[in-house]
Amino acid sequence: MKTTRTVLAVGSLGFFLITLDISIVNVALPNITRDLGGGVSGQQWTIDGYTLLFASLLLFAGNLADRVGAKKALILGIAVFTLASAACAAAPGIGALVAARCVQGAGAAVMLPASMALIREAFPDSGRRARALGVWAVGGAVAALVGQPLGGLLTTLDWRLVFVINLPVGIGMTLFLLTVARSPVRPARFDWAGQILAVVALAGLVYGLIEGGHLGFTSPAVAATLVIAAAAIVAFVAVQARVAHPMMPLRLFRSAGFRLALGVGFAFMVGNYGNVFVTSLFLQQYLGLSPLHAGLVYIPSALFAITGNLVSGPLTNRFGPRLPIVAGQQMMVIGLATLVATIHLRSVPLVVLCVIPIGAGGSLAMPAVTGVVLDGVDPDQAGTASAVFNTFRQVGGAVAIAVFGSLIAGSPAFLPGARASLAIAAALLLATALASRRVRRRATGC
């Protein structure tokens, strides 16, 4: 029992740290731009540099967790993440900051599937695992709760402190891990060809979407980058179908529940990342709120998100995953649609009310979706399956920042670009909510 509690605490701390570095940095973007320059493009790359490497290396990280053991992989990820955080804090310019953020993303990529695999090892029973995943997800909700206001407070003093705060958390996680038993390993070769193609595909896609909003999508450099990305995606799928040890085994996609979970995870991140990115810029750069006051706007949403995480497990155990998955996405749609309809009123209280169902809905749906992923695979592939799932999630986040930032930068005024961005997120979540009605009532049948 002590071991399971320790594993759950470490896994939750890992998710906390990864999520914190998204929410806490968003609030600091205007101050970072003021000190280091870079404009909207620099703001996009500060977020997407992290997300890009995170998404690109998750599949590799899932294989790593299975091969060397979840505990060892998690320690490695924490070390890389913590050192990169120190580099971010010391960055002399926007280029150095983006580079350090990329390394941070690599560390986070190793941490996430390893933390999920540790939980899969500690909670083999699906019922207990559903409750554990709800608690694990609270780590992300707590990070969202403290991230925005803490980021605002620290940015008021010095934006570099938003990266320094990661150091004691990383050290604390390492100390916790020293008490956890060694994880089982599953020897397998790394899929280097697949990894290279994955990085090329995702880097090309994100670069093309970000720079396309500034240079135009007819620009030769942008067009060539997107063509290369498309070719790399096709080549990646071909490699995965032929190699003996693929980093993304295509047989995972035979499960309808798994395929649906990937779509839901992608849409969730478009709505979640897109909402925080757009509303943070709206509150600070459009309405002129201070970083601290902008951060306080998200506190009610984060409190409801914690409740959603804790309720998701019991709801899943009683009614199956369909109810929390569908209801959670519908709540996000309501929040986003209301925000689209009212953003022109420039009302901070309305923004507070609109982001509540976005945070609460996402927190209700995601633990259940994660359970669908883990229930559908063998225990020795938990790391790989969670990596595939989180890759799709992070790609959704990266694409959201790239596309929404381009829409805002390319619009003659802020509000039309912001409205279009939030409407796209709402439409995508509505589509996946409707598709999620096909999820079986019980996870075992997904």
Image (cartoon, rainbow, N blue to C red):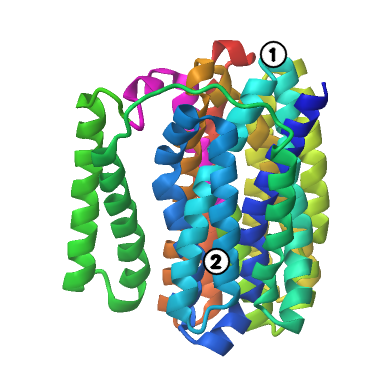
Q: Residue at x 67, y 53 (%)?
A: 17
Q: In the rendered view of the protein, which quadrant contains the N terminus?
A: top right
- Visible in this render: residue 129? yes
* Residue in the image at 41% along x and 46% along y: 57
Is residue 262 magenta-colored? yes
Q: Amino acid at mark 1?
A: Asp
Task: Provide the residue span drawn in magenta.
Answer: 247-271
The percent coordinates of residue 395 (x first, y second) are: 44, 49
Q: Is residue 369 at all visible to an observer of this figure?
A: no
User: In x, y percent, where is residue 361?
Assistant: 70, 43
Image position of 446 with respect to 303: above or below: above
Which residue is outermost to the top?
A: 445
Q: Is residue 95 above or below residue 54?
A: below
Q: Is residue 272 left or right of residue 211?
A: right
Name the secondary structure under disc 2: helix
Q: Residues within 10 Å of mark 2 (few under 14, many from 20)?
A: many
* Secondary structure found at label 1: loop
Q: Earlier in the sequence, mark 1 or mark 2?
A: 1
What's the distance in space between the residues labelled 1 and 2, CA to CA?
44 Å
Looking at the rendered structure, the kind of residue marked 2 is Arg
Mark 1 lies on residue: 125
Identify the residue shown where x is 62% and y is 55%. Answer: 337
Q: Which of these two is toward me, 326 or 377?
A: 377
Decide: is 370 above or below 398: above
User: Which residue is denoted by mark 2 in the rendering?
Assistant: 419
Residue 356 x, y percent position in the rendering: 76, 53
